Amino acid sequence: MKKWQTRLFTTIFLLVLVPLLSGCWSSVELNNRAFPTMMTIDRLEDGDLEISLGFPLPNRMIPNQTGGSNNGGGEPFTFISKKGKEIGPILRDIQLDASRDIFFGQTRVIVVGSRLAREGLDMVIDLVSRQPNFHISANLFVTEENVEEIKKAPTTSERFISTVLTKFIDDRLTLNTTIKDFLMAKYKTGDILIPRIGFEKLPTSEVVTSGKNLWASSEGAVIISNGKMVAERHLSNEELRGALWITSQVDSAISVIKSPTDKQEITFKINNINTKIKPTLKNNQVVFKVNSKGTAYIFSSNSNIDVKNAEMMIKLRETLNKDIESLMHQTFKATKQVKCDAFRLSDYLDWRYPQVWNQIKDQWDDYYADRVKIEVDVDIALNLTGTFYRSAGRTEKN
């Protein structure tokens, strides 16, 4: 290529890149926008809806400046709440109270109260799907307490309460259920699990910020059947652990079992958890095989079991595997009790045996509860036993 052609090509290429350097993506300046990071919504006793949007306050997020948090400017987060009959007018009233244009592009957490959850989440899903700036990756939570209590939750380690809730998911402490997951479930059966949060009152001595006396915590999960919350049955924290195993939403876990020798507690750290679900047909019956694998080592032990003994190690491994299998069976049983295919086993059946699915899909709820057989097989490999072959606190005589 001639020298002048090279220069011409380079010049054209640089000119094409110039518009990208402006960084402009909207005609509205950032300083004129308000970015709610969370939304709460519930049905009140009088039948009205109440919606709250949580906003970061930029003028309080920079310390040592006017209005900064280090100069007594207050917390860097606030809520604007409004009540009404319909979502549209409520959001309009919130916009009237905000000094900036509301933009939902940063909204990552939606907390739904139990009254509205029992009616169904269609109203919330409709709102999100009609807002082009609202990400369907936003996380859903449900609380059975007054949803407004979330404003009383302190943010000891984080700036915003929305960050506290997303940390529950990032740290694999609860289920990761998004708007997208709900939409996919709604397309077929409308059955899914949504993490449940609760609020525990803090002792007076532990209250750091005035009015912030309720500690937000993960409290199992609610069962959504046909798009509505099942009021009579929730997953406990223990069953939530089983749900995390079944959905492979946990990479590592702590499991405590009773020693097969003296019934003392042994704690294991389990890593590399991976669960696969596969439907099969046996004698015209639908059977789901749930296979879970991982590796584990002894985290702590109060038992006198001799881990140098190969036979004892086999028994220990069998005990650990059976304990996790029992936990997963218990979780499946909880969903069967309310005829809710919360783990969307129907999807696996449809993918592998579409003809069978088409035959039973109209009575799937009853079929899942009464006829579907679930076989759970857990295979955890014990890799490390630690420095001590027996508990350091127990003598040979004990």
Image (cartoon, helix red, strand yellow):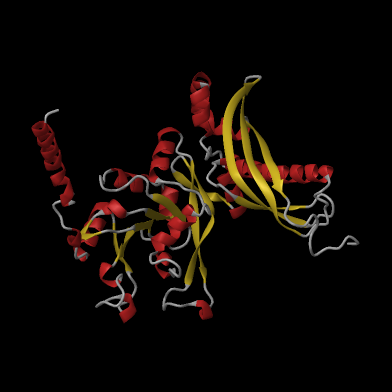
Asked if one can make out residue 101 in the rendered structure from this viewpoint, the answer is: yes
Residue sitting at x 61%, y 34%: 290
Residue 279 placed where, x, y %? 58, 27
Residue sitting at x 28%, y 55%: 85
Residue extending furthest toward the right: 397
In front here: 268 or 204? 268
Q: Tell me: 161 left or right of 360.
A: left
Residue 8 placed where, x, y %? 9, 35
Q: Quadrant of the N terminus?
A: top left
Up-down relation of residue 241 to residue 364 (above or below): below
Number of marks in picture: 0
Asked if one can make out residue 72 in the rendered structure from this viewpoint, the answer is: no
**Quadrant housing residue 184:** top left
Residue 28 placed where, x, y %? 15, 55
Residue sitting at x 48%, y 70%: 214
Q: Tell me: 210 left or right of 387.
A: left
Up-down relation of residue 108 to residue 98 (above or below): above
Residue extending furthest toward the front: 3
In front here: 352 or 232? 352
In front here: 343 or 316? 316
In front here: 79 or 25? 25
Residue sitting at x 63%, y 35%: 291
Residue 330 placed where, x, y %? 65, 44
Q: Quadrant of the C terminus?
A: bottom right
Up-down relation of residue 353 to residue 252 (above or below): above
Up-down relation of residue 99 to residue 329 (above or below): below
